[in-house]
Image: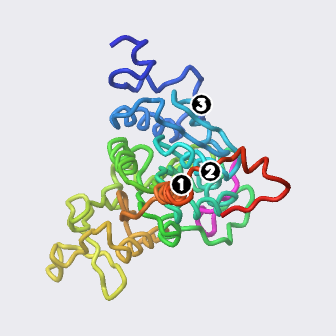
Amino acid sequence: MTDGAAALGLGALTRKDLMTDYTVRWCPGCGDYSILAQIQKTFPQLGRKKEDFVLVSGIGCSSRFPYYMNTYGFHTIHGRAAAIATGLKLANPDLSVWVVTGDGDALSIGGNHFIHLLRRNLDINLLMFNNRIYGLTKGQYSPTSEFGKVTKSTPLGSIDWPFNPPALALGAAATFIARSIDVEGKHLQKMIKAAYRHHGTSFLEIYQNCVIFNDNAFATLTDKETKANHQLLLEHGQPILFGRDRTKGIYIDGASPKVVDLADSEYSVDDVMVHDKTDRMKALILSEMTYRPEFPVPLGVIYEVEKNTYEDLTYQQIDYAIEKDGPGDLDAILHAGRTWEIK
């Protein structure tokens, strides 16, 4: 296959086909580099032409993404990427639409658009890079910063309780919620594919390290010596185990989770919670482990159910209206006089 054929979207895509000639401008060591690499590696595996993909971003470090992907893209305004993506998907449902946003962009000024995108359930993929800080504006605390976080805007420590993104998404009636980490390349690729396959709004939270303003925020999850005891890798239908020898598990005591050691004869693998991604209550239990240091951090697909998408229902209504009243004549309406009656 020639480079020209690849440029036209003919034949199999490669990562090179999705790279642009823009100089990638993030701080050296930023987790965004890894996320960009995994997306460029994963998109060619989805069996689509690059012209089918559209990346929509707001404002923030993550929002440079459309410049670095040789696809269609929109660099929009702060917190409004979800609104632009909604209009785009409704206008052309055949496109694969991806929102790229950060924890500040999505959950602060964009919080209203975030929850309504999830509840409407358009077939849109939302990637939220969560570094628990404002990076572009130089280190202020964000809606996901921990309680007591000392930053340039909270020198005595934040007194805001942080948003818990998976729990917030559950409350907004999301149909797909997952989490990964910037440096876990294979796992991140797996989650991107799972998000793409979901018919509905997919919310993928990606823990992303900001080396300048919040370095090592997720060090226990990424350090080789500690990650086995802090990563809770979820697999649908499998017992929820973790630890270097997978001898620890999550046991439900009444309605509350607790960590148990299977080396203790009091518990066995049969006592451990089995992951069911379709079970909303189990998803809530897993989500609530966020910000609780006594628990490992759930990674993988936390929740997934199927529900009619907003664009499918919209076009069903349009088809019904046309069948009932005919296609209509916009020119006739515009020239009908000073007032119109819309049925």
Q: What numbered label is drawn on residue 322?
A: 1
- For the residue marked with disc 3, what is the amino acid? Tyr
Residue 188 position in % (x across, y down): 38, 46
Q: Residue at x 46, y 34 (%)?
A: 52
Of helix, strand and loop, which one carries label 1?
helix
Colour mode?
A: rainbow
Over which residues does the magenta segment extend?
A: 137-149
- What secondary structure is the stretch in magenta mostly built from? loop
Residue 145 in magenta? Answer: yes
Tell me if residue 214 can be seen.
no
Does dot 3 land on a helix, a strand or a loop? helix
Q: Which residue is mark 3?
A: 67
Count of labels in the image:
3
Q: Are marks 3 and 2 in contact (CB under 8 Å)?
A: no
Q: Which residue is mark 2?
A: 328
Amino acid tagged 1: Ile
Q: Which residue sits at x=41%, y=37%?
A: 38
Amino acid marked by disc 2? Gly
Q: Earlier in the sequence, mark 1 or mark 2?
A: 1
- The answer to which image quadrant residue 182 occupies is top left
Horizontal side of 1 relative to 327 (left or right) equals left
Q: Which residue is at a point 67% across and 51% down the rendered structure image?
A: 80
- Distance (Cα) linking label 1 and label 2: 8 Å
Determine crowd level at label 1: few under 14, some 14-19, many 20+ residues with C-alpha closer than 10 A: few
The quadrant in which residue 25 appears is: top right
> Residue 6: x percent and y percent?
40, 18
